[in-house]
Image (cartoon, coloured by chain):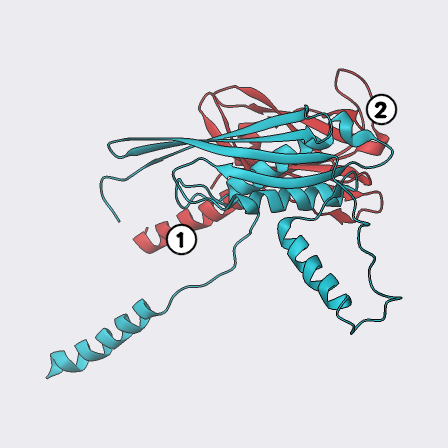
Chain colours: A cyan, B red
Amino acid sequence: MTLLRHALPLAFLLAGCRSRPVVRYEDPTGVETLTVDFGSSDLQRIASDLTQSMLRHAVFDAPQPPVVFVGNVENATSEHVDTRNVTDSIRTALLKSGKVRIAVDPQGRGEIGGQTDYQRSGAVSPETAAALGRQVGAGHVLYGRLTSIDKKAGRETDLYFKFTLNLVNVESGLFEWADEVQIRKSSKRRTFGW
Amino acid sequence: MRPFACLSLALAAASCRSAAVYSVTVDTSRMEQVSSGTVEGTIEVQPGGAILARRIEVSPPRRREASGVVEVQFELRNRTLREQRFDVRFEWADAAGMNVDSPSTHWTPIVLGGNEKRPVAGTAPQLDAVRCTLKVRLSR
């Protein structure tokens, strides 16, 4: 009976402690090393290094900022990586620099199409409706590729990422800029522990 | 000493270790542009604690301008003979001291071998970003 009197509250206490998750805010710009997989720190580093490299190139020193279309980044790795996340960050950084103009992406084209259809439906006065055929064509296209080499030996894992980005002139078809970021990460599973 | 007291001291030491940040701020608009060599500019240094100061040395910065964009480079040196892991981060502000936020404002891990020197460079995210701060901390 005494055992039950002491054990029962303790069991409830432990059960309560176990079921309550500890939630806290973390610095989104901090170094994330939870797993060896592609993570937020890798995304930030790739976006930052490539944007900085690109902005130093002479093509962005023109009096009239070049118009760039941010294309796709092929994910040639074995893991699921949302490469749109990287290109979104690169596009944001390029726009914030004030040295580039960015042409609308497919998602934006869909939104614009819906809006122009609505404006031509008769609900909008023709004076305020946006004129068609006035969009600015991109002079450059940005696209790239993410590759990885994944090796495992016993308890050790070694992961190498390479992110390559290219800027091509639409008219001439020539590469005007290209750069790559390499990241290597390793992890070792402990002999004991979880 | 009780085990709990030891743990508290260890945790306190660990938290101090991770919180220490060495920072160097330069006003790039007051730095003379030179093709090579270190540049004397307006430099403010905030030492990041004794442990960090014993492990890292930050050289005076160099500056260059490419396509109208300012680039600042520091050289980091591992002052010990063992491999050390640091996180570095560049922060930029405009002439009024207002923070210029960009995706480049993040901590980047860097591994330095014993006594190894390595340059780290930051590019101004916007044309009006003139104050550059390099922050260095020990990796957690």
Kind of residue at disc 1: Ser
Residue matched to label 1: B8
Give the side of residue B69 with respect to residue B20, left or right: right
Q: Which residue is at 82% across, 60% downward?
A: A130
Residue A186 in the image: x percent, y percent? 38, 33
What chain is tagged by disc 1?
Answer: B
Kind of residue at disc 2: Glu
Residue B2 in the image: x percent, y percent? 31, 53
Numbered badge on residue A127 = none
Q: Residue furthest top?
A: B36
Q: Quadrant of the N terminus of chain A?
A: bottom left
Mark 2 or mark 1, which is nearer the start of the sequence? 1
What chain is tagged by disc 2?
Answer: B
For the residues bearing labels 1 and 2, Cβ distance under 8 angstroms: no
- Nearer the observer: mark 1 or 2; the answer is 2
**Dot 2 alpha-carbon crowd within 10 angstroms: few under 14, some 14 to 19, many 20 or more:** some
Q: Tell me if residue B52 comes above or below residue A23 in the rendering.
A: above
Residue B18 in the image: x percent, y percent? 51, 44
Q: Tell me if residue A192 comes above or below residue A124 in the rendering.
A: above
Disc 2 is placed on an element classified as: loop
**Dot 1 alpha-carbon crowd within 10 angstroms: few under 14, some 14 to 19, many 20 or more:** few
Residue nearest the viewer, comparing A173 with B102: A173
Residue nearest the viewer, comparing B103 with B57: B103
Numbered badge on residue B32 = 2
Disc 1 is placed on an element classified as: helix
Query: Is residue B134 visible in this depiction of the protein?
Result: yes
Q: Quadrant of residue B60?
A: top right
Query: Is residue B122 visible in this depiction of the protein?
Result: no
Residue nearest the viewer, comparing B89 with B114: B89
Q: Which residue is at 80% across, 28% downward?
A: B41
Q: Quadrant of residue B68?
A: top right
Residue B93 in the image: x percent, y percent? 77, 43
